[in-house]
Amino acid sequence: MLKSLAVLSLSASLSLFTTQVLAQEKPPKPEAPYPGAETEPTESFQPDDPPPVTQSKPNQENLEIEDEIIEGNKFRGTRKIKHPGSKQGLFRITSKGEYLYKTKPSEQKNAVAVRIGPYSPVNLYNAENGNSFDDIYGSASPVIIHIDYEWKLFSGFGRMGLRAGSGVFFANGNGRFSNGDPAQEGYTLLMLPNSVSAVLYLQFWDRQPLIPYAEGGLDAFVFNEYRDDGRPTFGRFGGSLAAHASFGGLIPLNLFDRLGMIRIDQEYGINNIYISAEYRLVTHVAGSFDFSNSYFAGGVLVEF
């Protein structure tokens, strides 16, 4: 028992001595990473400042919006913005994402006019038997079609052009006996209203909503009257000279769809399309057959 206590006492003494010795020792001097490093001056590291962030200024060109192009009310659902595309003529971005650019209209040199209206030559008589147009073909007015090609001359006090054209008119009826009773043979009258004329448009600005015009010229009516029994074989031919004057007005379709007309101009070179209405007065000048009358006609005019 005494021997065991002596051993434990000796072990405790050795542990205490070892702890005191270790506490009195100094830590080792740190070694330099390479020779002479301990003599180099110590510099503090300062990271470079990041470059200043500047926001690029947007292009100051305004995206102009023209009220005549805007669909709907200018003050409802639309606004002006800034856009770099305005330098290239961009003036509008639609709600569908379409980019619209300003373009110059194509050059306008010519036009085609087509008109149709009820026509009956009430003063046309057969000098041999005294039958009138109404006696053979009835009092109901058939229609006459005019087709004219126009060359633009100048623009100044309005616009002026020259026209040349023709058309077609035909009617069907039955012959008459000498006592006035209707006969069985059928008649067909085919007439071509050839004409040359000058036309003046009272148009003074591009988007004029109504364009009055006046036209005057000479007519050469050529016709053929054919019997269904073939007597004579090719029927009878004739003609006469007349003069005409027309007064009417044009309504441009770009009032209703300007964007559509711009696209038609860009794709097909058609500047404008108009709805036309006129009053036409025809006066007999020379010849045995009188095609004089007055009537209303309407149609379209296409400029290109």
Image (spheres, rainbow, N blue to C red):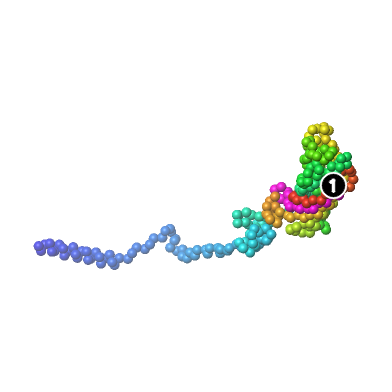
User: Farthest residue toward the left?
Assistant: 1
- Please name whichever residue, 199 or 137, is drawn nearer the observer in this view of the structure: 137
In magenta segment, residue 34: no
Residue at (68% x, 52% y) in the render? 260
Let me know if residue 255 appears in the view.
Answer: yes
Asked if 57 appears above or below 168 in the picture, the reply is below
Q: What residue type is labelled 1?
A: Asn
- Please name whichever residue, 248 or 203, is drawn nearer the observer in this view of the structure: 248
Let me know if residue 225 appears in the view.
Answer: no
Asked if 291 appears above or below 37 in the picture, the reply is above
Residue at (81% x, 51% y) in the render? 294
User: What secondary structure do most residues of the magenta stretch adopt?
Assistant: strand
In magenta segment, residue 274: yes
Asked if 259 appears above or below 222 in the picture, the reply is below
Residue at (25% x, 67% y) in the render? 20
Q: Count the labels in the image.
A: 1
- Please name whichever residue, 299 or 131, is drawn nearer the observer in this view of the structure: 131
Q: In the rendered image, which residue does mark 1 sit on?
A: 123
Position of residue 148 measured from the top left corner of the image (x, y, whole percent): 79, 47
- 25 left or right, relative to 300: left
Residue at (22% x, 64% y) in the render? 15
Position of residue 211 measured from the top left corner of the image (x, y, whole percent): 77, 57
Q: How crowded is mark 1: few (under 14 residues within 10 Å), some or many (20 or more)?
A: some
State the extent of the magenta-drawn residues as a range. Answer: 265-283
Q: Can you say which quadrant of the picture contains the N terminus?
A: bottom left
Position of residue 275 measured from the top left corner of the image (x, y, whole percent): 73, 52
Position of residue 103 measured from the top left corner of the image (x, y, whole percent): 71, 54
- 12 left or right, relative to 75: left
- Please name whichever residue, 171 or 92, is drawn nearer the observer in this view of the structure: 171
User: Farthest residue toward the front?
Assistant: 179
SS for callout 1: loop
